[in-house]
């Protein structure tokens, strides 16, 4: 059963500060701890399921709205509520779908309006669910960046509180609470594997993992490699997005926080092909009866394709981060090369 709604927010017309206090402007484990306290009892604790010898699945697709993004959206909106920093125009976000769903869900729980900009290519199942959650949905452009531009213009005109799909410390810190829950359930986990688009989930989990001696592996599609490109360039850069997982991993540019944590010794970054993602998605259904979206399948694809090969001493947790998908296309997915 879902938790009881949080009481309606106080609102004001001016938009105030966005970032919490962080060390050097980078998200830290202290931010993740604060997020865990703020959203406690309002999100579903993650369940772990065995997936092989010393391998576990984190079933985060069972989270509210079907993805991990509910954690960050609730942390962001609740933190701004605590600061009386929610304008009368409510909150606005650009999203490939999942972050918008989370934003709309959190806004409804907190009694504020949500305007969500998505590309015209966003899956119909996500658009329909956004409307079910009461969001004002605006479909603009062919990819996330175009929707983001339209959202920015809307915020400048309306004064709405601008949220973000991934590039905000409150969003990333909320996502990072998943790492705490995984370790509470399985203290022996030494490696966590996560699909990565803009890097919010990766940054939050890596921030929470370092002092615990846990490795975090960021997995990107070959055709949507914003983190890989940033590592090569030494700074976030724009990339071309062309992947079957683009609706959830199609960020054109990775966050600075994600790059910061990707450069730390406990982080790894790997690429997987679209055929391997499709094969992993099909295998999850065939062997485990788990239907996830393509972006979520990128994480197990790293193990099953050999892009990441765990050592004999590693206990691995693979995050299945989202399931906002139509499973009817599973049989038509391309074979791995």
Image (tube, rainbow, N blue to C red):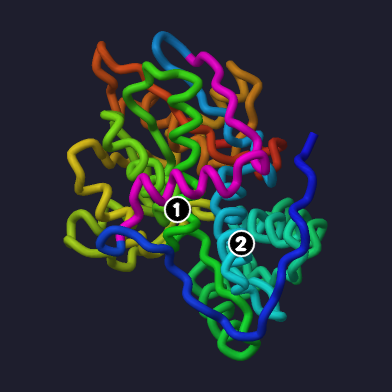
Measure how far apart labels 2 and 1 are at the Cα level: 13 Å
In front of the other: 104 or 32:
32
- Res 31 visible: yes
* Residue drawn at point x = 40 percent, y = 19 percent: 187
- The first of marks 2 and 1 along the sequence is 2
Other residues around mark 2 within 10 Å, as few (<14) / some (14–19) / many (≥20): many
Mark 2 against mark 1, which lies toward the viewer? 2
In front of the other: 196 or 77:
77
* Residue drawn at point x = 57 percent, y = 80 percent: 150
Location of mark 2 (residue): 77
Q: Is residue 271 left or right of residue 45?
A: left
Location of mark 1 (residue): 172
Other residues around mark 1 within 10 Å, as few (<14) / some (14–19) / many (≥20): many
On the image, the x and y values in percent for residue 282 come to: 57, 28
Chain part drawn in magenta: 26-51
* Residue drawn at point x = 80 percent, y = 63 percent: 134
On the image, the x and y values in percent for residue 158 come to: 65, 87
On the image, the x and y values in percent for residue 137 come to: 72, 69
Does the magenta portion include 29?
yes
Which residue is the extreme one toward the bottom? 157
- Res 325 visible: no
* Residue drawn at point x = 69 percent, y = 72 percent: 115
In front of the other: 301 or 317:
317
Place residue 82 in its image quadrant.
Answer: bottom right
On the image, the x and y values in percent for residue 57 come to: 51, 23
Does the magenta portion include 53?
no
């Amino acid at each position: 059963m879902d938790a009881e709604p949080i009481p309606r927010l106080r609102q004001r017309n001016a938009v105030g500060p966005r970032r919490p206090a962080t060390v050097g402007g980078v998200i830290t484990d202290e931010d993740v701890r604060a997020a865990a306290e703020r959203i406690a009892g309002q999100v579903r604790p993650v369940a772990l399921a065995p997936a092989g010898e010393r391998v576990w699945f984190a079933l985060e697709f069972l989270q509210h709205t079907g993805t991990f993004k509910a954690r960050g959206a609730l942390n962001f909106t609740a933190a701004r509520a605590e600061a009386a920093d929610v304008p009368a125009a409510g909150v606005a976000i650009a999203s490939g779908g999942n972050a918008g769903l989370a934003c709309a869900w959190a806004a409804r729980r907190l009694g504020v309006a949500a305007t969500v900009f998505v590309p015209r290519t966003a899956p119909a199942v996500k658009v329909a669910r956004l409307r079910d959650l009461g969001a004002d949905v605006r479909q603009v452009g062919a990819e996330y960046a175009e929707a983001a531009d339209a959202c920015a213009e809307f915020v400048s005109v309306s004064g709405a509180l601008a949220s973000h799909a991934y590039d905000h410390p409150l969003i990333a810190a909320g996502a990072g609470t998943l790492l705490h829950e995984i370790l509470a359930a399985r203290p022996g986990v030494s490696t966590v594997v996560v699909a990565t688009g803009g890097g919010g989930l990766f940054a939050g989990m890596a921030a929470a993992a370092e002092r615990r001696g846990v490795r975090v592996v960021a997995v990107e599609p070959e055709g949507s490699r914003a983190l890989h490109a940033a590592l090569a360039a030494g700074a976030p850069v724009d990339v071309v997005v062309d992947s079957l997982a683009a609706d959830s991993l199609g960020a054109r540019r990775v966050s600075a926080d994600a790059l910061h944590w990707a450069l730390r010794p406990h982080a790894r970054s790997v690429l997987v092909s679209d055929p391997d993602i499709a094969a992993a998605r099909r295998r999850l259904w065939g062997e485990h009866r788990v239907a996830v979206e393509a972006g979520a399948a990128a994480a197990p694809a790293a193990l099953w394709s050999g892009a990441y090969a765990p050592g004999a001493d590693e206990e691995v947790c693979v995050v299945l981060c989202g399931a906002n998908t139509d499973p009817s296309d599973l049989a038509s997915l391309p074979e791995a090369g």
